[in-house]
């Protein structure tokens, strides 16, 4: 969708971005910012089983203070939330990508979860969980509120029969902070 289509969808209530800052809107995407909530991998070296319920305990929650950066080390992995909360109607999906300016520091902001399904955040706009990883040999400071990723939006040819938030088995409905993996619910 173009910037004009994004704004039109917002006016019609088909798309919600909260808070919305016009300056973050590009010709065909919107920049989104890193929040203050992080889940840090702990017990490094432990074998993890995605199908085991208790594996969420391998993360430690950290809340950054206003203006406090997080130092991401080489080969370090964290989950982070976004400042923006997103609500998609049943005929709009989105894709998240890293920003070039962040990628040039060797920071990856999503491992595999690049699609945001139609109907995500339709019950209540929700934050996104970023899968942040550094391939930079040097530590990199990540600041809450910094532009870290961008969202592109796509209008579906037909409305989804059942949006993400309404679908039975959707695991990340209504999130406000980064969520640990829930593959055991599959």
Image (cartoon, helix red, strand yellow):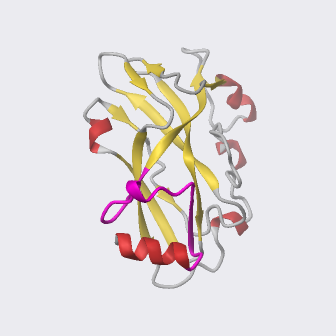
Question: In the image, 130: left or right of 152?
Answer: right
Where residue 71 sits in the image (x, y, percent)? Answer: 45, 18
Residue 1 visible at all: no
Whether residue 99 sits left or right of residue 133 in the image: it is left
As rendered, which of 100 and 167 lies closer to the eye?
100
Question: How many badges with numbers are in the image?
Answer: 0
- Magenta stretch encompasses residue 20: yes
Q: In terms of depth relative to the viewer, which is nearer, 80 or 162?
A: 80
- Residue 150: say if magenta: no
- The residue depicted at 59 percent of the width and 30 percent of the height is 38
Residue 123 percent location from the top left of the image: 72, 65
Q: Position of residue 107 (x, y in %)?
A: 35, 32
Q: Is residue 127 above or below residue 15?
A: above
Q: For the magenta stretch, what is the residue range? A: 12-31
Residue beneath the point at 69% across and 52% down: 171
Above-or-below relation of 51 to 124: above
Q: In this orientation, does residue 129 appear?
A: yes
């Amino acid at each position: 969708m173009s910037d004009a289509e994004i704004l039109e969808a917002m006016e019609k209530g088909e798309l919600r971005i909260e808070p919305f800052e016009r300056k973050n809107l590009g010709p065909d995407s919107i920049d989104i910012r890193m929040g203050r909530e992080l889940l840090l991998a702990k017990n490094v070296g432990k074998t993890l089983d995605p199908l085991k319920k208790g594996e969420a305990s391998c993360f430690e929650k950290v809340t950054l203070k206003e203006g406090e950066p997080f130092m991401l080390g080489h080969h370090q992995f964290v989950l982070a939330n976004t400042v923006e909360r997103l609500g998609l109607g049943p005929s709009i999906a989105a894709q998240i990508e890293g920003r070039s300016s962040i990628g040039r520091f060797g920071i990856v902001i999503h491992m595999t979860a690049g699609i945001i399904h139609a109907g995500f955040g339709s019950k209540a706009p929700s934050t996104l969980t970023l899968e942040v990883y550094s391939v930079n040999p040097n530590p990199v400071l990540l600041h809450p509120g910094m532009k870290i990723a961008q969202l592109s939006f796509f209008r579906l040819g037909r409305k989804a029969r059942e949006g993400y938030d309404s679908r039975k088995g959707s695991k990340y409905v209504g999130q406000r902070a980064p969520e640990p993996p829930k593959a055991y619910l599959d």
